[in-house]
Image (cartoon, coloured by chain):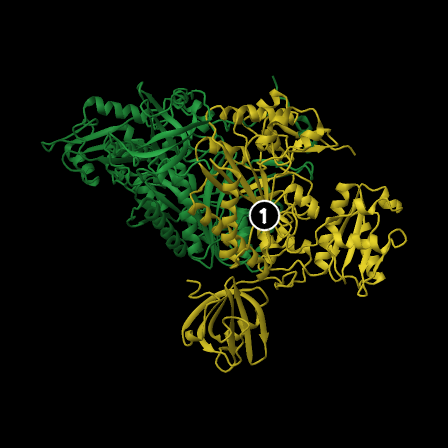
Chain colours: A green, B yellow
Amino acid sequence: MYRTHTCGELRISDVNKEVTLSGWAAIVRDKGALLWIDLRDRYGITQLVMDENYTSKELFETARSIGREFVLQATGTVIERASKTNKIPTGEIEIKVTELKILNASKTPPFTIQDDTDGGDDLRMKYRYLDLRRNAVQKNLLFRSNLAIESRKYLAGIGFIEVETPNLIKSTPEGARDFVVPSRMNKGQFYALPQSPQTFKQILMVAGFDKYFQIVKCFRDEDLRADRQPEFTQIDCEMSFVHQEDILNTFEGMTRHLFKNVLNIELGDFPRMTYDEAMRRFGSDKPDMRFEMEFSDLTDVAKGKGFPVFDSAESVLAICAPGCAGYSRKQVDELTEWVKRPQIGAKGLVYVKLEEDGSLKSSVDKFYSQEDLKQWAERCGAKTGDLLLVLCGEEEKTRKQLCELRLEMGTRLELRKAGDFKPLWVLDFPLLEWDEEENRFFAMHHPFTSPKPNDIPKMESNDRQVLKSMRADAYDLVINGSEIGGGSIRIHDRDLQARNFKLLGFTQEEAEAQFGFLLGAFEFGAPPHGGIAFGFDRLCSVMNGASSIRDFIAFPKNNQGRDMMIDAPDAINPKQLEELGIKIVESKP
Amino acid sequence: MYRTHTCGELRISDVNKEVTLSGWAAIVRDKGALLWIDLRDRYGITQLVMDENYTSKELFETARSIGREFVLQATGTVIERASKTNKIPTGEIEIKVTELKILNASKTPPFTIQDDTDGGDDLRMKYRYLDLRRNAVQKNLLFRSNLAIESRKYLAGIGFIEVETPNLIKSTPEGARDFVVPSRMNKGQFYALPQSPQTFKQILMVAGFDKYFQIVKCFRDEDLRADRQPEFTQIDCEMSFVHQEDILNTFEGMTRHLFKNVLNIELGDFPRMTYDEAMRRFGSDKPDMRFEMEFSDLTDVAKGKGFPVFDSAESVLAICAPGCAGYSRKQVDELTEWVKRPQIGAKGLVYVKLEEDGSLKSSVDKFYSQEDLKQWAERCGAKTGDLLLVLCGEEEKTRKQLCELRLEMGTRLELRKAGDFKPLWVLDFPLLEWDEEENRFFAMHHPFTSPKPNDIPKMESNDRQVLKSMRADAYDLVINGSEIGGGSIRIHDRDLQARNFKLLGFTQEEAEAQFGFLLGAFEFGAPPHGGIAFGFDRLCSVMNGASSIRDFIAFPKNNQGRDMMIDAPDAINPKQLEELGIKIVESKP
């Protein structure tokens, strides 16, 4: 037996007990006649003590040979500490060691195993097994494990069945790029790894499973941005005989349950907003609702006053930064530079300060009277001491730029508070999204999303604007500006699905080849159904106010899709290629 | 709202309630003036009734248009049935329908949606969404979902953390064949899908996670036998600071919990047996312990009496079939033919009948006296009325053949009772397995398994027999003759791991290239650790006394590794191949 207790559980009430602990030497302090070791495991830290007065010379020598991260087994008596600490739960006791065994030695780690480590990203990824020893990272993965347990508890508790769908499926070019897997038994053919279990969960509804969920790995071979991973995890759900309302209520319930049971936070209202409204008021389909700073449209009052920049703009939009009228020239210049960075791309920034004396001071004073500016301020609901920030240009772009500026101001004004969680349902997403490059429509959610019943007659229109105006029974759950879940009511009628495929540019043959099994299934009694999928990695990070999902993934890949620890991907054996019947195309020099 | 109740919940106490149900038309019975529909969903069946006396003509016409598997929504009043049935829980009531809506039509299914369907395997696989509607299949997947929930409940309850390990890892030729995934961002390189999270769970132990588990998909590109799938699920577990005893106790606990909480069965003892003993007594490392019929070794008493077949055999082994002395000539001949089939491969079968009159009758009477045969019978513990069945030949082969014969006799004598569960730990597996074809040793469990401490000095031996005699801290959990779990104490010392790789024929460079990260991790304080993995699909089937794991997988693949429903694998787009930098090698005509 390697231990009688963990390193986190002994208390003052255990004094005089004979115990054996195992763990890692976090810190060794050698004061000559006295030597202390902080012994660490997942559960905590317990101090070991050795004293020349009672510790054998041999044991003392063993102790002196111990370096950081050695694995030890120590037996001894629990005693009360002379100098107690309340920094750790075991801080009132220590172990007077009578036996000490080195279970394994350790080289000196390349970085310190502490909350604020000195290891850079690359080093930490390469030595992930050491990085994972840090309390901060272990805490994140414990959180994740716990969140999964509570998700399952909630869903199983209301009758959902977890069904495992296959990972070796078929490549469907619609949507993101698939990872593919060459088949040895069917040479020249490939499986694909699922981007989501979408069609399988719909098949399960056709099969009568009624309420399905799965916490499941999904795969997308995309160029990786800082916060994307080639493999990621979803809480994937589907229900039969439901309208949108049933789904919103069910998953509002789950979200409340998770916040309550994992974070002990009671979430407030889950307000609802249409996509159009969200875009108009916040320039985003995932607005951060922890603060207001809504958009005001100044186009009609700002144009036609002789300021050429506004006059030639499609849209003039403003936000009101409360209490910022005192911003210095330098501060405003800095903000202007900020919006002009290529990531934002604005041409410039116009401001209006509502001074304490009641006057309005603006960068466009010479084009606009005090009356004009007052009209702007009124429309923005600004009051004395506030600062209007105005952007202009093509409507869609200006919205996006102002959305970024709003978030930046929210951050600067500390309105996006950690620990404050504001959920929002965004509803009625457009059915279609026009792709300029490919000159065709794509499904905004996915090809199985149901148009709103009133919009179905528009499906055969030849007018791009009419098609763009179609709305879907599609919804996103947004928390603090992050989309944590999205879903839709699905099409369950074969003909409607066929019409939707046609709208997306599928020939009948293509639709049949890729999704024939689903169209077929719809012919044998498909029930009305719909669902949602939560980004599980994202949910973890949002609930912890963290910026990156990587901190919640045990073995993440870097931006080149590499696992730095195991050094994958890697070349494979020529015999393997031969068995698979594939060849690597030598790249041109 | 599509329904107020499910089709499984209305009872006599609900009479007079106005309800709305949704589901599938399982059966439509049209008796002219009366029409009944059995409405089915996952939860049960409720009878709808329409009566010319009170049902509108229009509604009646709708009802008459309904075929099997139509999706319906029915509103009406719960009434007491005239002719009640106790075959279904809703059998005391029916719904007097006032509104009936066809939510979706259905073509006539290609097979009946019943427990004993008329669909062949191929048809059922192709129309899996219909097959999955059958109660028998739904029950299996509900069982599976429930078993996963209980597994997680038990493990989380004793401090295990579920950690998701990556699916895109590195190919390691040792062991079974990997599925590989070409990398687009790192052209010419490949990921591999994990055969198990083995190295990652060990890394998690080095990282201090202490107790890890995961219910996880694993992948093996093997030629598929009837009961193997290219993707399968494991309950994968690992613990730090443990000896074998700790692991056996922990997972005996889990197994008891699952049987108790999912099947309501209290398992009896978990006896333990070494690999050598299991092979000697039952000719198998996974003996079915529901019945005895142990092997007796007759070699010393059967040889040297002039029967050339036995005289030239390495081993003469027998089992005693209780109460079978009355077997007719035909029965014995038939058994002889059975052992001579190529799947078994015995040359012949010798029998000894212990007749009621005390005499012994044998097929080798002319070589053996009554005294000789009595000695055999005594050694086999046979009594009057029993039948000895004797095989001979090369020891290992004879054991395998007799093992098959034992199982066959157990089946014929109905000693392998459904609902009777007999667990067994098989311990002390050999460390190495000699491969005649490759002329080298392979790890019997895997290359990370620890040799028994006493056997470590044998590792550098050049004597094949000495190496063969090495035993490992490796164990299997067997229930009713099926291996449901297997594991080992792992090596945690870098040098020992390097010596083991060498023993398995790895050069230092190969070991470094494939497992350098693990060897590296062992240098930074690896704790003693060990683990186990349960075959989750197998566990489902064993607990249900089923013969195939396929019945417990929602979307299984056939023996050619194909998903018949979605028709995968399939050809992919030339653009995809180009992006991946690979080419299909045209097979020679």
Q: Residue furthest front?
A: B371
In the image: residue A493, left or right of residue A454: right
Subunit bearing disc 1? A
Q: Residue at x 61, y 20 (%)?
A: B508
Q: Position of residue A501 (x, y in %)?
A: 54, 47
Quadrant where the C terminus of chain A is found in the figure = top right
Helix, strand or loop at mark 1:
helix
Q: Is residue A472 visible?
A: no
Q: Position of residue B26 (x, y in %)?
A: 57, 67
The three-letter code of the residue at mark 1 reads: Phe
Mark 1 neighbour density, 10 Å: few (under 14) some (14–19) many (20 or more): some
Q: Residue furthest left?
A: A357
Tell me the quarter of the picture where residue A571 sits. Answer: top right
Q: Residue at x 57, y 26 (%)?
A: B497
Q: In this view of the protein, which residue sits in the foreground, A348 or A71?
A: A71
Q: How many marks?
A: 1
Tell me the quarter of the picture where residue B220 sits. Answer: top right
Tell me the quarter of the picture where residue A86 sits. Answer: top left
Q: Position of residue A134 (x, y in %)?
A: 38, 30
Say which residue label 1 marks: A515
Q: Position of residue A461 (x, y in %)?
A: 49, 49
Q: Is residue A351 visible?
A: yes
Q: Residue furthest top?
A: A589
Q: Residue at x 55, y 37 (%)?
A: A178
